Image (cartoon, rainbow, N blue to C red):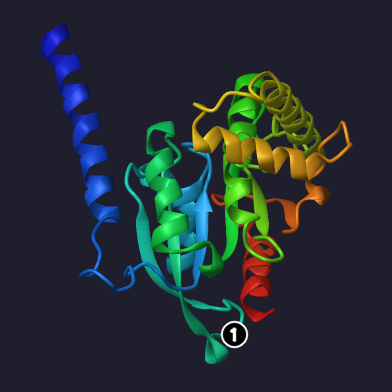
Amino acid sequence: MGFIELILATILLGFLISLGLYLFQNYEHKSGKTSPYCKPTILITGPNNSGKTALFFKLLEGPFSADYNVSTLSSIEPNIKEIKLPLSNEKIGARYQLIDYPGHKRYISLFNKLITEDVTIKNIKGVIYMIDSSTSVLQDEAVREIAQQLLRLFPLTEAKLGGTDFLIAVNKQDLFDSRPVNRIRQLLQAELTKLILAELHESRLHEQDEDEDEGSTSLRDFCTSLMGTSKEFTFDMLEGNVDFIGGSVLRNKTDAWFNWIDERVVN
């Protein structure tokens, strides 16, 4: 295949994936009826290749065997299945929706629609945000992108009374070069502080700009309300709890994550 044909094939694949996601999320009942995805939900999201899809299938299928080919567990489309929770006691379990959503930037608007209009924020019982903690992956740019995605999420999830709880699932803690959990928390708080202060500075420059889009305005309103007079962001400022817990999907070190999920559905 020539270079031009390869480029065209890549563009076509991207278009088909985006179209599939659009049709997937816009499949609804007739006018006046609720979306089929409007039900109690545990949401898994985060950057690409952080372990989201592996965790999704582990929750559904149980521990991985030693020879399990985890490299095949990657998804460019949302995975949605029904799961019975709490995991620790199926006898008292209720049915929940488990969603694994791809982390690519191009799906941001579709992702926002899914959680605000289809599932609805009130139905999200918890958000699991997966992070690859290996030093080779978690460089400055990766930390910045994670902070940017979290800052886009928080205004949506904090709209619910009491906020929405987050599990920052720090994956691949079994690797020798993994960053410590507390250090990752510090890095993200520092990066979020930079982003929020930059957003507030931008808002002062555009105070009289009537043509500014609604998304920018709502984010700045959120940042203003969140920070008050503070100059440093901490996760404790949010209404919802944000728990950083280390583990490893591949090594079946997920008990603490599973306990977190159970707590969200029994409380």
Q: Find residue 231 and report its image quarter.
A: top right
Residue 105 in percent (x, y) is at 44, 32
- Give the residue at the far bottom of this rendering: 91
Residue 196 in percent (x, y) is at 72, 31
Q: Residue at x 73, y 53 (%)?
A: 242
Q: Residue at x 72, y 28 (%)?
A: 200
145 relative to 226, above or below: above
Quadrant of the frame with the N terminus: top left
Residue 239 in percent (x, y) is at 75, 58
User: Identity of the amino acid at label 1?
Assistant: Asn
213 relative to 91, above or below: above
Judging depth in this view, the residue of 207 and 126 nearest the camera is 207
Residue 190 in percent (x, y) is at 79, 29
- Residue matched to label 1: 89
Judging depth in this view, the residue of 76 and 65 nearest the camera is 76
Judging depth in this view, the residue of 84 and 156 nearest the camera is 156
Dot 1 alpha-carbon crowd within 10 angstroms: few under 14, some 14 to 19, many 20 or more? few
Q: Residue at x 53, y 62 (%)?
A: 121
Q: Residue at x 58, y 29 (%)?
A: 145
Q: Is residue 119 visible?
A: yes
217 relative to 244, above or below: above
114 relative to 199, above or below: below
Q: What SS does tag 1 mark?
A: loop
Number of on-image labels: 1
267 lies left or right of 137:
right
124 lies left or right of 107:
right
43 lies left or right of 38:
right
